[in-house]
Amino acid sequence: MEQSVKINSKINVKPSRFGKKYYIKTFGCQMNEHDSERISGMFELDGMKKAESEDNADILFVNTCTIRENADDKLYGTLGQLKKWKSQADNRKLLVGGCAAQKDKELVRNKAPWVDVVIGTHNLTNIINLLNQSEDWGPVTEIIDKIENLPTDAPSIRESEFAAWLTIQIGCNNSCTFCIVPSVRGPEISRRPVDIINEAKQLVSEGVKEITLLGQNVNSYGRDLKIENKSRPYFRQLLEQLNDIKDLERIRFTSPHPKDFKEETIYAVKDLDKVCKQIHVPLQSGSSSILSKMHRGYNKERFLEKVDMIKSILPDVSLTTDIIVGFPGETDDDFEDTMDVVRYAEFDSVYMFKFSPRPGTVAHKMNEEFVPKEIIDNRFDTLKTTQTDISERKLKRFVGTEQVLLIEKISKKNNQIYSGKINSGQITHIGKENLKLGDLVKVKIIDSTPFFLKAELV
Ligand code: 5AD
Ligand code: SF4
């Protein structure tokens, strides 16, 4: 009997690698993690199964990131080690994709000729074809400048059965001067609402309870769409349609851009029962002059107004942000402005980055104003110390409250404990007794640690 692979997909692959095992190493953001799920889907369509580690894999895919310099360094270090991996068994295949491959094009190939397939971010759905070509003709590189198939047309194998990502938009039309994303991911393209809703319904039919909408600038969703000349499908309308999907329990989204955050979106978060009360607003810097040099489209006061608006509509909201320390020309006063916003906004958590000049960006050319490393390190430590206190305090506010917890996985450290998230996104641990994965249960928060909450059933 012929074996078959059952994956919901619009992409046709004739399976030819039954019995082979693949492993994917992912660097970078959620977008990359989601792309890796799609690559898994393509590999499984081709008949392969996931290996527990790269040691017992026949095919290894490295999904690269280039957002900061250390991501690039990691890649070129990794490629050296992977030459050894390839030589440890016969017929192993090494594939490199993602943002660094897209950006560096021939560089990956030149630095690591032992890589079988180098593929960019725009043509992931061609991966099996390229793998076949490399077996027939030797190493191949395919990096194209424009998207062919939305990666969302590919099937996907998810890490979690109950929580899934859903891409609503790819690329970015902004021009933040530090950021490499627009040049590797291309201009903003929104998926049609009907495709998004259909994918969401499909996910729910597979048992998914929580969906996180993904895009570089989700609250500008739909700007590029015109459907039958009717009003554009704004983000709020999309949230409303998703909220109506039966048996979908939770909706999250990331990342919005502060300049495009409208009051109507905050009201949608408030009014739509399935939209989680958690908002990520990437600050980047609290200094108006640095924000202007970053080309962010808002200043300190506008950002604080947005924070006030969000908190007045959603008093219990969980707020998170991204901050870059040491952008070119950042003075002590500029940094103090950032600290001022941090103390005022009291974010639940902050993703902190040291400025990293990316070749090809405007900020890379500001080299005369680069801030010395020791100063960046000191400022980073100051920010970290202050924020760690705030984050711990913000977590403590949940102790004694009742929450709804989605049980997502078994804790890595203790197999008698489940780990999941409460509505506002905080990681929460609970004993396994009387529970199973996928349960959505009422709990009481009984304790907090610096990084997660502890709960018991009520
Ligand atoms: N240097 C440091 N941090 C950066 N980010 C993006 N580009 C850079 C860079 N060149 C950070 C921003 C962004 C997050 C995903 O990564 O804070 O929001
Ligand atoms: Fe980069 Fe700015 Fe686009 Fe975010 S909004 S992806 S930081 S250019």
Image: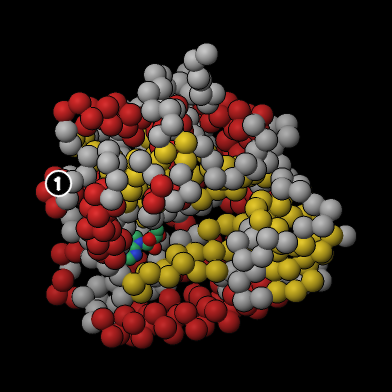
- Residue 17 in sight here: yes
Q: Locate the C terminus by quadrant.
A: bottom right
Q: How many labels does the image show?
A: 1
Residue at numbered disc 1: 113
Residue 371, by quadrant, is bottom left
What residue is at 27 percent from the left and 41 percent from the top?
A: 90
Question: Is 351 drawn above or below residue 46 in the view shown?
Answer: below
What residue is at 44 percent from the left and 85 percent from the top?
A: 382
Residue 25 in percent (x, y) is at 39, 51
Instruction: Name the kind of residue labelled 1 in the image.
Output: Pro
What residue is at 77 percent from the left and 55 percent from the top?
A: 404
Within 10 Å of disc 1 (Cα), the crowding (few <14, some 14-19, many 20+) is some
Question: Is 313 drawn above or below residue 156 in the view shown?
Answer: below
Looking at the picture, tell me which residue is in the foreground, 155 or 362. Answer: 155
Q: What element carries label 1?
A: loop
Residue at the far right in the pictured view = 458
Residue at the far left in the pictured view = 110
Question: Is 448 drawn above or below residue 437 in the view shown?
Answer: below
Position of 385 with respect to 108 (left or right) is: right
